[in-house]
Amino acid sequence: MKINDLLPAFITRHVLFALIFGGVCGIGFILFLIEFDHYTSTEEFCTSCHSMELAAEPYRNSTHYKPESGVRASCGDCHVSEGVLSATWDHFMGSKDLYKQMFGPDYDDPVVNALHLPEAAFDARKWFKKRDSATCKKCHVKEAIYGDRPDTLQIHMEDAKDKTCIECHYNLVHRKIPDEKTFKQDKWNAMIEEEFGLEKGSAKKILGH
Amino acid sequence: MSRSKQTLFFLLAFSLFILLGQSVSAAKVTLDPSSWGVEEGKACVDCHAKSSSGLTHQWKNSAHAQANVNCLDCHQAYEDDDDAMEHEGSVIATIVSPKDCGRCHETEFKQQEGSVHAKAVSIIKNRMPALTEHFGSLSINDAGCAKCHGSEVKVKGDGTLDPTTWPNTGIGRINPDGSKGSCSSCHGRHQFSKAQAREPSACTHCHSGPDSPDKDVYESSKHGMMFEAHKSEMNMDSDAWVVGKDYSAAPTCVTCHMGAAGKMKSTHDVGMRDSWNLNEAVSTQQYLVIFDDGDKRELSTSDPVPRRGESVSKIDGSMGKVKAVASPKRRRGAMTKTCLECHSKNFANNAMLQFDNVVELYNEKYGKPAQAIMQELYAESLLTPLPFDEPLEITYWSLWHNGGTRARHGAAMASPSNTWKGMSDVGRLFYGQFLTQLREVAGPEKSEALIKQYVKDSEHHEWLNHPEKSNPILGYGKMGYGKGSSNEN
């Protein structure tokens, strides 16, 4: 019996080859995406841009980098969604950062970086909120947050029942930035100017306002 | 009546009105109760009872909780406030400033705003660095000086409070909203207790130690002794706290400096009843100048008397229009009013006379000569302008700032042991160190001229001119005072 006898008439030999080839390519592409997403989520990849090294500095002193448990969360664990499609989409959207890195302000300059940091933080917080803190929940389970004090679990089960992680837990990992509601650009600028010993008012010029 | 006498009469009458013409009961909150108990703030305690149960417990036991004043009523902030921050969906501030408290407690806010307490930073701002930075460092300022005087709270660009300036409950704290002071200095946070603020410990938390020895002074006075013995009879929790009516076992610091007595109302302007300045090298009597915006300052009687409507500089350097002036005599009158609830007029006046005599003795015998000598040494460049780099400067400082303050405060508050200890410290420093170091600094000729002019020619130091007179106090000689007696040795 020939293989052709088992298949409908429209599956010709060419179609079969095309299907097998396409299938293999498809699997290969998915595997590639998985690997690609995996690699592009690593700290090593992210910090290959110098500007990200500046964001990574405070991260390396945070409990997410040095947890008692030894379970380290790397960049992508928090900032890239789970699932190959979502992860790829996040990376695709994230490529705007790459575009800005190449054609936008000089984020590698610590001053420029610090001045623009609040915008990035506000965007990131919105991203977490929109996804109901999905990446936090990959590791953290509200019902299992026992903490050091007896009331920690109770607070999470009762008072934070309808809240999502990011609503309370921001400023955990990166440089502390106030909530957008109470953020004051001029005060932020003044702080950065003082920190880097810059002339008063120079931050505004750097930001191009 | 001449015009100036008429003006003076008016000023006195007006000051009397300000000081005495208020009703007896404590100031009531006049704000409509719908202004507090904000809906958004009702849930805060659900979480805080778990996360910070201590402070929540304090609040639950407070008069605030009973009146339905919740966390957000005091802690709410506007988004554009410097120290505003987002917290669980609300915009709040950590610091509750006198201005925040004054939303309901308007009278107390206004009284404290003009008081010397509120200016505890502003008054010494220029002088303090010499002491803190030469003897310590900025960290001493943050953890020591500023804890009582107050810090200038700085809000960083990221909305956090500069950790060198906060936490702080110094009485003259300069708050991010520009208001001065800290109600929690005396009342504590969250329980916000009247009783706590009436305790002497509320004051002696800061008014103790070498340069403000009022803890020692009060505790060793008859007043402090009675307080200790009759603490339970003090009715400290009472809403109204009029001496002689709501309590009579003993006076605390609050009784005399702030308390209600007879028709005189209580006040949160703590220095109002003080006629002397006892914390300077030389004490002077002080006018209390009241500006038309309610702000106040003190002026020495050695300055010209400011007139009503005149422009006078305020503590912060800006100019203010004088509304009224309370004379030292009037201020003393207010202080003495409290005494009369327990003592006769003569008793009170005589006690004040004994106090005044000690201040004048200190001034004439030590304060003025030492000050004059120091001024001449600076003028003739025998001392560098830099404070505390020469031993004589440290001696001079200890003389008036430590010993001199103890003697004068001891006399003010009837502590015989501190009056004597202070004055004997001053004498020991003056004769034992100051004059010796003066000789080293100025050389034999100049120092002898200065000592003759300011010391030996003064009746207070006349005894130095009779080295032949003996006395058995040091184990040598006999009672040598009186003519010829020294020859018997």
Image (cartoon, coloured by chain):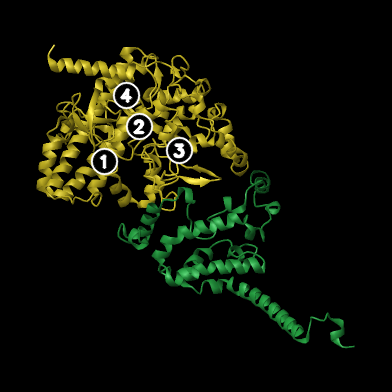
Q: Nearer the viewer, mark 1 or mark 3?
A: 3
Q: Is residue B280 left or right of residue A132?
A: left
Q: Element type at marker 2?
A: helix
Q: Earlier in the sequence, mark 1 or mark 4?
A: 4
Vertical arrangement, residue B86 with respect to residue B102, above or below: below
Which quadrant holds the N terminus of chain B?
top left
Which quadrant holds the C terminus of chain B?
top left
Chain B colour is yellow
Answer yes or no: are tags 3 and 4 on the same subunit. yes
In the picture, residue A206 is in which quadrant?
Answer: bottom left
Q: Residue at x 38, y 30 (%)?
A: B217
Q: Nearer the viewer, mark 2 or mark 1?
A: 2
Residue type indicated by callout 1: Leu
**Mark seen at residue B113:** 2
Q: Element type at marker 3?
A: loop
Name the foreground residue: B451 vs B125: B125
In the picture, residue B487 is in which quadrant?
Answer: top left
CA gap, disc 2 and disc 3: 15 Å
- 10 Å crowding of disc 3: few (<14), some (14-19), many (20+): many
Question: In the rendered image, which residue does mark 3 sit on?
Answer: B96
CA gap, disc 1 and disc 4: 31 Å
Say if mark 3 contacts mark 4, CB within 8 Å: no
Residue type indicated by callout 3: Val
Residue type indicated by callout 2: Glu
Residue B377 appears in the picture as rendered? yes
Answer yes or no: are tags 2 and 1 on the same subunit. yes
- 10 Å crowding of disc 4: few (<14), some (14-19), many (20+): many
**Mark seen at residue B429:** 1
Say if mark 2 contacts mark 3, CB within 8 Å: no
